[in-house]
Image (cartoon, grey):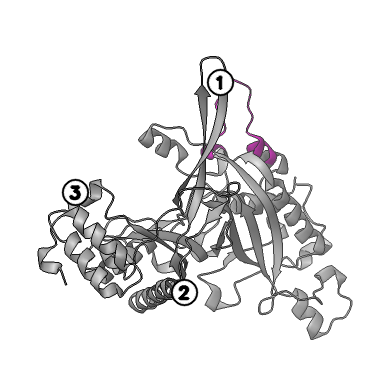
């Protein structure tokens, strides 16, 4: 072919375009030669080395890691581990990976979302071009129309890349649903002044899908068990143990049980669970969660910017695990046989619960602080009115807003928290 005589940027691009649907090995050779030449800087300026964005889901067991975010080389993180594997896979080039949520040390995930960008010479197909016009209306997501051969080659590359990454990653991290990221429409309002009148015009521009900016809601879950001990040692890294002892409730509390109920200090009643559910429901709605976020003042001082601490919690649910239709509580059991004792006596998994949070987004340690505060209120160590006051956080003008130090409750341990899913408009 013309490899020895290809010299300028313009000639390369004009040579590539006619062979878009031909055998791609020639095109791959040309781009690799182009990327390794002295014209890389010129190509970057002229957008010839446009990156192609990929997205994927990540599940991980976070016990052995110091959280998601990249840290020093001596501390292992989820992001750092994935980036190190991508660096090995693509010839020692660091490929930044952006996650939708930065989980703490010891926190797990089942539906974390990420994106990363690859250069043209690192993929065996021509990068898709962004759309330039909107036919009808402004759709939420846009995709690239390709013929069957192009689609098959892209799918094969994504499947092979996903397989190779999982082969190289530790078993605590799994990547799935790896695919080309679509484009999204970003709308901009501009004012046009013709001298006499001013009109507002809305324009749309395609931009690459973004793991954080394209997300709309997140689902977190917190798993815990109630009773004298954590019965299942296999769950010690994924479930927290909260001791529910009515004898711990202060004598002055209106929620202190009767003496007859004190005979079995670990026995839960239906009223206990209903009360915990009612406490958790206080979080629903839009509130200022500054008293539930961690390191807000430090981050504001470091960045010089004010952090918006207002968040919307769409739903909070207390779920029994495992789900059993025949479940009965202790005070509803009339038969003393073993089956009834098993339903209410914390044998096996009978004391396991899960709290589901569907929210717009979370501050640092916000979900763990919400769980820890709700448990303290439930046990009677903190007044429910104080929790409501922390959520309102609407002091009179001129007064400083409540901060994390104004909330005396500790955050719940990290092992019970899981980022279940990050939701997007295109059902990714």
| Nearer-the-camera pick, 129 or 319 | 129
Measured as percent of width and height from the top left, residue 85 is found at 30, 69
| Nearer-the-camera pick, 410 or 6 | 6
Regarding mark 2 in the picture, which secondary structure is present there?
helix
Q: Using the rendered view, name the quadrant where residue 174 is placed.
A: bottom left
Residue 148 is tagged as: 2
Q: Is residue 379 visible?
A: no
Q: Which corner quadrant holds the C terminus?
A: bottom right
Compare marks 1 and 3 and give the one earlier in the sequence.
3
Compare marks 3 and 2 and give the one earlier in the sequence.
3
Is residue 250 magenta-colored?
no
**Residue drawn where x is 54% and y is 53% of the image:** 215
Residue 84 higher or lower than 205, as above or below: below
What residue sits right under mark 1 in the picture? Answer: 198
**Residue drawn where x is 18% and y is 61% of the image:** 34
Question: 245 left or right of 85?
Answer: right
In whole angstroms, how far apart are the C-alphas of marks 2 and 1?
A: 48 Å
In whole angstroms, how far apart are the C-alphas of marks 3 and 2?
A: 33 Å
Question: 352 left or right of 150?
Answer: right
Question: 100 left or right of 316?
Answer: left
Question: 29 left or right of 422?
Answer: left
Measured as percent of width and height from the top left, residue 5 is found at 10, 64
User: Would you say the residues marked 1 and 3 are in contact, meaning their CB atoms lie under 8 Å apart?
Assistant: no
Q: Is residue 57 visible?
A: yes
Q: Please report the bounds of the magenta region as a residue range.
A: 388-406
What residue sits right under mark 3 in the picture? Answer: 42
């Amino acid at each position: 072919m013309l490899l020895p005589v290809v010299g300028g940027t313009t000639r390369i691009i004009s040579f590539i375009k006619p062979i878009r649907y031909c055998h791609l090995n020639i095109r791959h050779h040309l781009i690799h030669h182009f990327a390794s030449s002295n014209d890389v800087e010129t190509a970057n300026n002229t957008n010839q080395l446009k990156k192609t964005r990929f997205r994927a889901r990540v599940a991980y067991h976070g016990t052995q890691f110091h959280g998601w975010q990249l840290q020093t080389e001596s501390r292992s993180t989820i992001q750092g581990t994935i980036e190190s594997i991508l660096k090995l896979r693509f010839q020692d080039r660091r490929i930044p990976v952006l996650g939708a949520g930065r989980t703490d040390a010891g926190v797990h995930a089942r539906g974390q979302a990420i994106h990363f960008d690859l250069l043209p010479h690192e993929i065996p197909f021509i990068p898709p071009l962004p759309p330039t016009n909107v036919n009808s209306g402004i759709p939420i997501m846009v995709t690239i129309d390709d013929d069957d051969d192009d689609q098959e080659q892209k799918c094969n590359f994504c499947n092979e890349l996903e397989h190779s990454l999982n082969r190289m990653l530790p078993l605590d991290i799994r990547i799935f649903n790896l695919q080309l990221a679509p484009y999204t429409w970003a709308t901009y309002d501009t004012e046009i002044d013709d001298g006499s009148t001013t009109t507002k015009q809305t324009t749309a521009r395609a931009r690459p899908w973004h793991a954080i900016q394209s997300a709309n809601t997140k689902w977190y879950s917190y798993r815990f068990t109630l009773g004298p001990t954590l019965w299942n040692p296999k769950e010690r890294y994924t479930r927290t143990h909260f001791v529910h002892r009515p004898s711990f409730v202060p004598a002055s509390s209106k929620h202190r049980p009767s003496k007859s109920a004190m005979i079995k200090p670990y026995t839960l009643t239906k009223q206990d669970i209903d009360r915990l559910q009612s406490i958790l429901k206080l979080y629903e709605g839009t509130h200022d969660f500054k008293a539930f976020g961690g390191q807000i003042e430090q981050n504001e001082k470091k960045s010089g910017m004010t952090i918006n601490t207002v968040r919307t919690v769409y739903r909070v649910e207390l779920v029994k695990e495992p789900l059993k239709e025949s479940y009965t509580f202790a005070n509803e059991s009339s038969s003393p046989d073993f089956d009834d004792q098993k339903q209410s006596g914390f044998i096996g998994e009978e004391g396991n619960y899960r709290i589901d949070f569907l929210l717009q987004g979370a501050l640092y340690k916000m979900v763990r602080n919400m769980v820890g505060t709700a448990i303290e209120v439930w046990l009677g160590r903190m007044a429910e009115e104080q929790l409501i006051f922390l959520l309102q956080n609407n002091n009179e003008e001129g007064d400083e807003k409540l901060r994390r130090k104004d909330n005396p409750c500790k955050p719940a341990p990290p092992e019970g928290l899981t980022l279940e899913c990050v939701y997007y408009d295109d059902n990714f």
